[in-house]
Amino acid sequence: MNYIKLLNAAFEKFYFDDRLNPTHISLYMALFQEWNSSRFADEFYVNRRDLMRCAKIGSKSTYHRCVTDLDSWLYLCYFPSNNPYKGSKIKMSIIGTSDEPDMGRYNPTLEQLAEQYHPIREPIAGQHHPINGQVVDPHRPTSGQVLVSNTNNIKQENYIKQPKGWQAVINFFVKKGFNADEGKKFFEHYEIRNWQTSDGKQVRDWRALATNWMDRTELFDEENTSTKKEVSQKRDNLRTTKNKDYGQPL
């Protein structure tokens, strides 16, 4: 995949699509960045809270409306997740095709042709140069800048399987706007299970797991609040006054 060509093709399609508004474009760019971080995988998983923060979307209904619109308009394929430990799955559509060679990756054939035109091994400014017939970094392009690998490496370094004590968990929950008791509950829940998921797999990133825990907590609180309101309304409807005037006609 070529980062620049994909992005230019997307912007060209945005220009002629009058159905889009700024929120659609903002969400698409957040998804495109996640796609780039996953090395343009065929399918990848996303977290709604992180996407909303990146796209500057403050409403869950707006997020779901935009991602559904992008799916129906063939910008991507959206597969909602019913698993609280796994985010929704996204499959991005490849906009624009070309038969031109992909200059964003190292091509050994092009490297050999370049060697024929530069038999004297003189350093070329701004270009990757092999030493003693061996390529120093086979994944680095012959010219230009790698747009994917650095971002992905940084993302992989941020994966921390287990927290460094309960205080780190509580600080993370407080930073996200939750109370310390909820963070303590999360830590004790997975500490007892030796930081394994319900299917017995080792936790890959406790921060992502904690974010999903917060999402489910918010959803539970919203459902619980709506249920209490319904029960309260039913009780009010069943209430009758003890002082009745039986002289009034029915």
Image: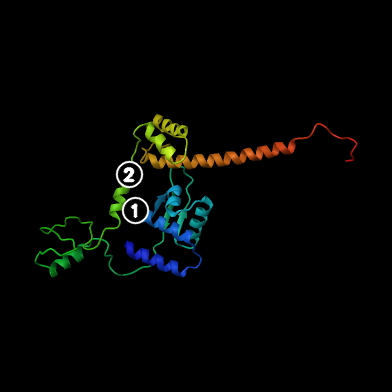
Quarter of the image for residue 133 reads bottom left
Helix, strand, or loop for circle 1? helix
Looking at the picture, how far across and down is residue 31, in whole percent? 41, 55
**Is 169 situated left or right of 130 in this image?**
right
The quadrant in which residue 209 appears is top left
Which residue matches tag 1? 37
Image x and y of residue 198, in percent = 43, 36
Amino acid type at circle 1 is Ser
Sequence-wise first label, 1 or 2: 1
Select label 1 or label 2 by which is in front.
Answer: 2
> Which residue corresponds to the image point at 40% horizontal and 36% vertical from the top-left?
171
Q: Circle 2: is it few (<14), some (14-19), or many (20+) Cα within 10 Å? A: few
Residue annotated with mark 2? 158
Badge 2 marks a residue whose secondary structure is loop
**Image quarter in which the N terminus is found:** bottom left
Which colour style is shown? rainbow
Q: Measure the C-alpha gap from mark 1 to mark 2.
A: 13 Å
Question: With 65 as the anchor, is 238 left or right in this view?
Answer: right
Residue at image position (89%, 39%) is 248
